[in-house]
Image (cartoon, rainbow, N blue to C red):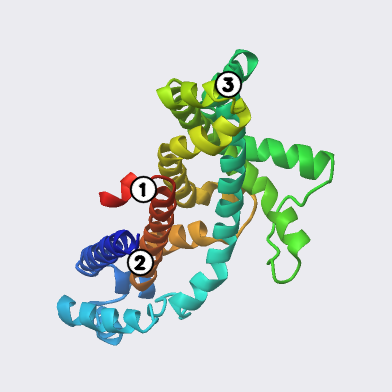
Amino acid sequence: MIAYILRRLGAGLVLIFVVTTMTFFLAYTQTGEVARGLLGQAVGPEAIAAKNHELGLDQPVVRQYSSWLTSALHGDLGTSYYTHQAIGDALAIRLPVTLSMVLVAITITAIFSVLIGVGSALRGGWLDRLLQTLTMVGYILPSFLLGIALVILFALTLKLLPATGFVAFSVSPTGWLASIILPAVTLAIGSIAGVAAQVHGSMLEELSKDYVRTLRSRGISDALIVWRHCLRNAAGPALTVLSLNFINLFGGALIIEQIFALSGFGAYSFQSTTQSDLPAVVGVVAVTVIIVVVVNLIIDIAGGQLNPKARVR
């Protein structure tokens, strides 16, 4: 298992290096409009040259990358061209907002996907039809419409939850949950269907195998067979889909953050990109790929624990 984890960790570190390197070179070879964007369209070439020199953009891109990589390895992702705030500090404020929303959403997704997927595989009937309905609704219904509907119902009509804002967990755990549950549910609705469908298909496949009939012939209850054996074997593909959903939810959080007025990672990423704030863009990509690698590593470890055959890959 240790060798398996080290292989996955090594592949993740290579991915982080490759993606951040490519992003840096693609961003910093297109610096022509950065100074003009900072100073305004009416400035002359002398002012632009002076600003590029101040920012270090007149140096060879290889030297700029070497300086950035050295600083990044020490935890310094640079300083924003526009706000003059350290990128690490800005992300430390905004990242917990998006991660809270996505982690709660993926927890909701995992719980309901297993319940619906297993139930529909065992019982069929109305649960199977419910799964098909959820799949269709989840794929068709735009998340921003669902978010607006939830705000109108639970915040404005029933007044049970706040419509906007974020409360840090360290300030108030209950306030944190109240502020994050509506955006998390909005994100989760669309992903439950896909994961539940995967659980449903994997469970049907497992239930048709010979070992299930053998266990039943020994008098072992169906509940024990399903939850101890079948679900364990069916969890691998479901975990893969769940990890992909986590990445999709993390990347698609921008719209939800706008609906619920959350100053999160998605909003910061969008602002940095539109402003051509190069240090912020590279910092955002670096943190994003690190999160992706960590999530995939966790899923790989969980899959390796559930299915020892996966460790030999």
Front residue (pair 290, 235): 235
The amino acid beneath tag 3 is Leu
Front residue (pair 51, 181): 181
Q: Nearer the viewer, mark 2 or mark 3?
A: 3
The answer to whether 27 appears left or right of 244 in the picture is left
In this rendering, does residue 277 appear at all? yes
Quarter of image, res 22: bottom left
- Secondary structure found at label 2: helix
Cα–Cα gap, marks 2 and 3: 43 Å
* Residue that appears at 37% across and 73% down: 38
Q: Alpha-carbon neighbours of circle 2 within 10 Å: few (<14), some, or many (≥20)? A: many
Q: Position of residue 241 (x, y in %)?
A: 43, 40
Q: In this rendering, is residue 115 above or below 306?
A: above
Q: In this rendering, is residue 93 above or below 295?
A: below
Q: Which residue is mark 1?
A: 308
The amino acid beneath tag 2 is Ala
- Secondary structure found at label 1: helix
Q: Which residue is mark 3?
A: 122
* Residue that appears at 73% across and 50% down: 163
Q: Position of residue 132 (x, y in %)?
A: 54, 20
Of marks 1 and 2, which one's residue comes earlier in the chain? 2
- Secondary structure found at label 3: helix
Pointers 1 and 2 in contact (C-beta within 8 Å): no
Q: Alpha-carbon neighbours of circle 1 within 10 Å: few (<14), some, or many (≥20)? A: few
* Residue that appears at 78% across and 41% down: 154
In this rendering, does residue 40 appear at all? no
Q: Position of residue 100 (x, y in %)?
A: 60, 58
Q: Which residue is mark 2?
A: 286
Q: Alpha-carbon neighbours of circle 3 within 10 Å: few (<14), some, or many (≥20)? A: some
Cα–Cα gap, marks 1 and 3: 26 Å
Of marks 1 and 3, which one's residue comes earlier in the chain? 3
The amino acid beneath tag 1 is Pro
